[in-house]
Image (cartoon, rainbow, N blue to C red):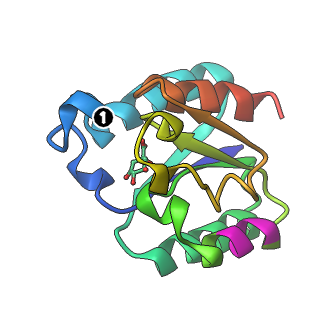
Amino acid sequence: DTIFVLNGPNLNLLGLREPEIYGTDTLDDIAGMLEDRARELDLAIDMRQSNHEGHLVDWLHEAQARQAKAVLLNAGAYTHTSVALHDAIKSVVTPVIEVHLSNPHRRESFRHRSLVGQAARGTIAGFGALSYLLALEAAARL
Ligand code: DQA
């Protein structure tokens, strides 16, 4: 089984971008960590990043078409704005787990509303790179 791990805008800069908030691990570091754990769980990881909202929508559809076991989605700032992502999550049967490095509820008020979270199966946030690993543990048990 494959787990899609979809990352939205600015996450390509992870490790350099506001490290006091997001940590120093890069997206490649996180991919490596997920792949190590996935191997133990007999799962495969398909990790992607895009700065474009529509790519994330297309990949959610692709996850369903490919019968992915689950999607881990860190939609970045689109979390707080994207009706298209909200609808895409609702449009597929594939379970989607919302992931954030930071805890948006401790931050600016514009991050307190999540359109992704209002459609996702569940949310893991606030644990840095570990949020992804915890989400993988959840996905493996669905
Ligand atoms: C984020 C939180 C979002 O509010 C922000 O726009 C991001 C990263 C996180 O992983 O903590 O880009 O999704």
Q: Is residue 104 above or below residue 11?
A: above
Left or right of residue 54: residue 19: left
Q: Is residue 6 above or below residue 78?
A: above
Q: Name the residue rendered at 41%, 47% in the picture.
A: 108
Split into 4 quadrants, where in the image is the C terminus?
top right
- The residue carrying mark 1 has its beta carbon less than 8 Å from ligand 1: yes
| Disc 1 crowd, CA 10 A, few/some/many (<14, 14-19, 20+) | many
Q: Which residues are magenta?
A: 86-90
Which residue is at the front of the view, 80 or 52? 80
Q: Which residue is mark 1?
A: 22
Q: Amino acid at mark 1?
A: Tyr
x, y percentage for residue 66?
71, 64
Q: Is residue 38 above or below residue 104?
A: above
Which residue is at the front of the view, 79 or 134? 79
Left or right of residue 47: residue 43: right
Q: Name the residue rendered at 28%, 33% in the picture.
A: 21
